[in-house]
């Protein structure tokens, strides 16, 4: 199955995507590649709204029928919202990883800029090389 | 195929493949000074017949005391079929196999066991068992902290079995879990609700441990305690005696209906009363159950019922992603086993007794203990410490320290109770006594006679030795 890597998002080497929202918030999810590698998702453990995250901090867990993986926050900031739909229907991550399957929104506030995230092209290349 | 893992030829092949001359050579890096050549003080080996004779003599020298000690392990009648069935070849394995689904019978038995624990506790999900009641409480405390990570404090009243409290602290303190002990209501022998209320501020604890019946055998005000805990956003960890659940409200229904949040959150306890012999303290098994909302935080194995590709029912290990072979250091617990053989015995015990049989056992225990308390408190110098409703244990207050009295009773063939002097000095000269369905009127009479003798001795004198069954 071909993997989608939308041009308008940024990525991490741990397979999260980041969408810049206009209001200083970013939306975070896992990539199409990640959901295909994990298989059918059955459970998502999310951080509390309000929790302060460091960039690179393990902040959520996605569990599939065969594995459980940590999600690392690509940015520093405060958890502003989480996708509570996933509690009932974690398979949204499989069916729409870049849309209805978003995980959380993080308010970056005045946090300093983090290390560079990957562009779509860089991420696609990284996945291809990691093979 | 012989069931010998390595023949001498296999061993020599493997050694030559890695270039080692002998098995001992593999341990070369251990300095000679650290190796113990012989074990000092070990007597010469005995033949099987000699060992049998020696142990028979030792057992006879111990005598057969009439046992009135409970305090966490209880002498119950175990119907002969329980262990006759549990030790059949089909069941007699202490372990879940590594390729678990190949053993549908084992998995079905564990599934039935889990279902029985759920029925007894009134909870939604149970695991396949843990090591014992004390470590089950430790795991329950860690589970509560995972479910409520904003606090690392557990309230554990002094009405909880002190051994359980100590084991929980030993296991959990290295994970920065703090335990706060709260006082006993000296009048009722229950958890003191005022001490509890002054123990925490706001949202500072993750859970309250409620033992029912408590360590002293007394029945706690479980509805009030549960409501209070939930109103203060604490989880409720119930520690329960499984026999007692046949006649008392299951933890899944603790709390008032008006509270809108009925039921304990985690239930655990010692499974030994369900068909496991006392056996000098083990092996026993711990049980644990919870609400579905917390199931991913529950340690241990869980067997689920499912269907295969052709739609036929079958059993499988489920929710394994929380276990250490998948989650490694982030697993919910390093417990990845269960007490399979003891769970097998318990499942057979419960199947044979059924709900009615277990209810009769529980009712008989409660009645026997009341008879014992009445018989003993007629003796001058012996009084019941509390008038609170109880299950099958009671605290007696003596007019002198309990330890010499218990020693004098032992010399008269009676294991008279558990001395509370060390664990609960605030109660005075107190001891905990227990009578289960195994104690007949004549046994209670024998205890009362021995107690009368012991209490008439000048204090400190132990009297002439005599054993009950001699």
Image: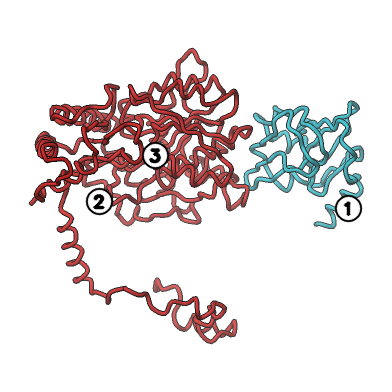
Chain colours: A cyan, B red
Res. B436 visible in picture: no
**In the displayed structure, does residue B424 sit left or right of residue B326?**
left
Q: Secondary structure at mark 3?
A: helix
Tell me the CA gap for discs 3 and 1: 60 Å
**In the displayed structure, does residue A45 sit left or right of residue B456?**
right
Residue A24, horizontal then vertical, whole percent: 88, 29
Judge the density around disc 2: few (<14), some (14-19), many (≥20) Cα neighbours within 10 Å. few
Residue A61, horizontal then vertical, whole percent: 68, 41
Residue B445, horizontal then vertical, whole percent: 10, 35
Residue drawn at x 51%, y 49% is B335
Q: Secondary structure at mark 2?
A: helix
Q: Quadrant of residue B60?
A: bottom left
Q: Secondary structure at mark 1?
A: helix
Please determine if labels 2 and 3 lie on a single subunit: yes
Q: Quadrant of residue B220?
A: top left
Residue where numbered disc 3 is placed: B162
Residue drawn at x 51%, y 40% is B306
Residue B438, horizontal then vertical, whole percent: 18, 39
Tell me the CA gap for discs 2 and 1: 65 Å
* Residue closer to the observer: B86 or B339: B339
- Quick one: which residue is furthest to the top in this view? B258
Q: Are marks 2 and 1 in contact (CB under 8 Å)?
A: no
* Chain ID of residue with mark 1: A
Residue where numbered disc 2 is placed: B84
Residue where numbered disc 1 is placed: A125
Judge the density around disc 3: few (<14), some (14-19), many (≥20) Cα neighbours within 10 Å. some
Please determine if labels 2 and 1 lie on a single subunit: no
> Which part of the image, by quadrant, shows the C terminus of chain A?
bottom right
Q: Quadrant of residue B414?
A: top left
* Residue closer to the observer: B18 or A53: A53
B193 is higher (above) or lower (below) than A130: above
Name the mark nearer the viewer: 2 or 3: 3
């Amino acid at each position: 199955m071909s993997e989608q890597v939308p041009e308008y998002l940024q990525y991490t080497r741990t397979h999260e995507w980041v969408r810049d929202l206009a209001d200083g918030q970013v939306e975070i999810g896992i990539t199409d590649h990640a959901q295909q590698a994990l298989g059918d998702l059955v459970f998502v453990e999310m951080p509390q709204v309000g929790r302060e995250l460091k960039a690179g901090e393990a902040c959520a867990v996605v569990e599939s029928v065969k594995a459980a993986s940590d999600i690392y926050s690509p940015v520093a900031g405060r958890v502003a919202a989480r996708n509570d739909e996933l509690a009932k229907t974690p398979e949204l991550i499989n069916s729409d990883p870049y849309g209805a399957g978003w995980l959380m929104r993080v308010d970056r506030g005045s946090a300093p800029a983090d290390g560079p995230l990957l562009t779509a092209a860089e991420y696609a290349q990284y996945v291809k090389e990691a093979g | 195929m012989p069931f010998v893992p390595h023949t001498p030829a296999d061993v020599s092949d493997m050694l030559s493949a890695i270039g080692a001359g002998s098995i001992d050579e593999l341990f070369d890096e251990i300095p000679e000074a650290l190796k113990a050549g012989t074990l000092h003080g070990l007597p010469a080996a005995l033949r099987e017949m000699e060992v049998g004779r020696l142990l028979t003599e030792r057992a006879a020298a111990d005598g057969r005391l009439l046992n009135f000690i409970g305090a966490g392990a209880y002498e119950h009648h175990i119907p002969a079929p329980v262990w006759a069935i549990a030790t059949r070849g089909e069941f007699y394995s202490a372990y879940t196999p590594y390729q678990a689904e190949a053993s549908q019978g084992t998995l079905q038995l564990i599934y039935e066991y889990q279902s029985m624990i759920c029925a007894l506790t009134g909870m939604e999900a149970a695991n396949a068992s843990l090591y014992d009641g004390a470590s089950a409480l430790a795991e329950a405390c860690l589970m509560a902290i995972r479910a409520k990570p904003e606090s690392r404090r557990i309230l554990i009243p002094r009405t909880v079995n002190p051994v359980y409290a100590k084991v929980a602290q030993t296991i959990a303190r290295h994970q920065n879990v703090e335990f706060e002990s709260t006082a006993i209501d000296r009048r009722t022998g229950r958890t003191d609700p005022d001490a509890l209320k002054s123990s925490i501020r706001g949202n500072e604890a993750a859970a309250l441990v409620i033992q029912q019946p408590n360590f002293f055998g007394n029945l706690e005000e479980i509805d009030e305690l549960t409501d209070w805990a939930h109103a203060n956003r604490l989880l409720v960890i119930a520690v329960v005696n499984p026999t007692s659940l046949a006649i008392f409200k299951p933890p899944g229904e603790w709390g008032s209906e008006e509270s809108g949040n009925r039921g304990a959150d985690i239930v655990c306890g010692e499974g030994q009363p369900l068909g496991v012999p006392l056996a000098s303290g083990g092996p026993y098994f711990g049980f644990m159950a919870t609400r579905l909302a917390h199931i991913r935080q529950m340690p241990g194995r869980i067997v689920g019922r499912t269907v295969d590709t052709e739609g036929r029912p079958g059993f499988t290990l489920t929710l394994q992603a929380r276990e250490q072979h998948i989650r490694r250091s982030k697993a919910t617990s390093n417990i990845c086993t269960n007490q399979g053989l003891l769970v097998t015995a318990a499942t057979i015990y419960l199947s044979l007794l059924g709900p009615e049989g277990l209810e009769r056992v529980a009712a008989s225990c409660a009645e026997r203990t009341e008879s014992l308390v009445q018989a003993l408190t007629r003796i001058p110098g012996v009084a019941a410490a509390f008038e609170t409703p109880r299950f099958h244990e009671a605290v007696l207050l003596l007019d002198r320290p309990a330890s010499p009295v218990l020693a004098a009773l032992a010399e008269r063939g009676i294991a008279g109770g558990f001395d509370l002097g060390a664990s609960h000095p605030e109660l005075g000269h107190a001891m905990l006594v227990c009578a289960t369905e195994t104690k007949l009127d004549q046994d209670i009479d024998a205890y009362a006679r021995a107690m009368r003798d012991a209490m008439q001795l000048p204090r400190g004198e132990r009297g002439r030795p005599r054993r009950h069954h001699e």
